[in-house]
Image (spheres, rainbow, N blue to C red):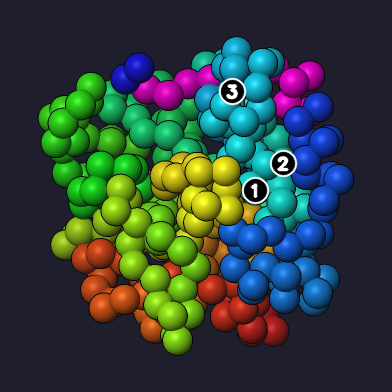
Amino acid sequence: MMIMKQTLSMTALSLSMSMSVFAIANAQQAWMSPEVGTAWSQGYLGQGVRINMIDDFGSTCERAFARCHGAWTTWQAQLVAPRASVVTHEAVTGVVGLVASTLNVFNLSYSFYSSLTSFPTELALLGYAQSGSAVIVKSAGNSSIPVGAAVPSGEYRGRVDNLAVSLAGQPSAILVGALAKNGTPANPASMASYSNVAGTSPVVQRNFLVVGVESSAMGGLAGTSFAAPIVSGYAAIVGSKFTTANATAVANQLLNTARTDTVTGYNAAIYGRGEASLTRALAPASIR
């Protein structure tokens, strides 16, 4: 497909979520940064925040949770922010609206190789990022290229992820790349071999974060698709502390507090702002 769109089986997804997320809510998972548990212990679990998952659910959700891309990304976001309201959507139905009086976060774990002009869902998401109405978290892609470069091979050879390019530089957008693991100053992490990188554009670098995707602890799953929902969960956690902060403030807090000492040979053209740090993002008494 040129564009990843989704259908939705709410029954299948609800069963999967009830058997996975809620049975082990507030349990630290092996693939999570230890900073997630620290945030939980302080009472910040995403409460009062809405995470909108726009993803591919499809018929495989009805047959096997393990095969369903959307179920996995939704599972991740809910596990990171167990008290957030995590809602799934069918993008093909049109614009996904905002909920008033709450922080709205949108997770986009897909690439988009067409012009946005004919697609109201993506145009609305871009508008939310431009106006700072919602935190828009977008996976960077898995072609081992800079964001905005043409895909070098395969089905989409020569195409550009126009959604990622459009979101770069927008006030409340975050582009997410994948590290091979969670990093620490004593044991820094390198970029995952498949992950797209920030590239030389300062506009992209400003909105680019990385987090660890430990595939061995996630049933062998790898890809920036599974990095984005971690950051969506982080945004919900930050929003659950700073309850009066708007989407731009929350996005900027994650971007501005990223660590450069937990990645190997920090270079903004690779890592953008660096590795997301919940501990640093939650440290102030208030943000704006």
Residue 97: tell me if it is visible.
Answer: no
Q: Which residue is mark 3?
A: 57
Circles 2 and 1, Cβ within 8 Å, touching? The answer is yes
Residue 278: tell me if it is visible.
Answer: yes
Q: Residue at x 34, y 37 (%)?
A: 163
Q: Is residue 43 left or right of residue 288?
A: right
Q: Position of residue 252 (x, y in %)?
A: 48, 68
In the rendered image, the quadrant that contains the N terminus is top left
Q: Residue at x 64, y 83 (%)?
A: 283
**Residue range highlighted in magenta:** 3-14
Per the image, label 3 sits on a secondary structure element best described as: loop
Callout 3 amino acid: Phe
How far apart are the two marked residues, 2 and 1, measured between alpha carbons? 8 Å
Per the image, label 1 sits on a secondary structure element best described as: helix
Q: Is residue 28 left or right of residue 200?
A: right
The tag earlier along the polypeptide, 2 or 1, is 1
**Dot 1: few (<14), some (14–19), or many (≥20) neighbours within 10 Å?**
many
The tag earlier along the polypeptide, 3 or 2, is 3
| Vertical placement of residue 104 versus 8, above or below | below
| Vertical placement of residue 145 versus 39, above or below | above
The image quadrant of residue 4 is top left
Tell me if residue 87 is in the magenta stretch. no
Q: Which residue is mark 2?
A: 86
Callout 2 amino acid: Val
Per the image, label 2 sits on a secondary structure element best described as: strand
Q: Give the numbered dot on residue 77.
A: 1
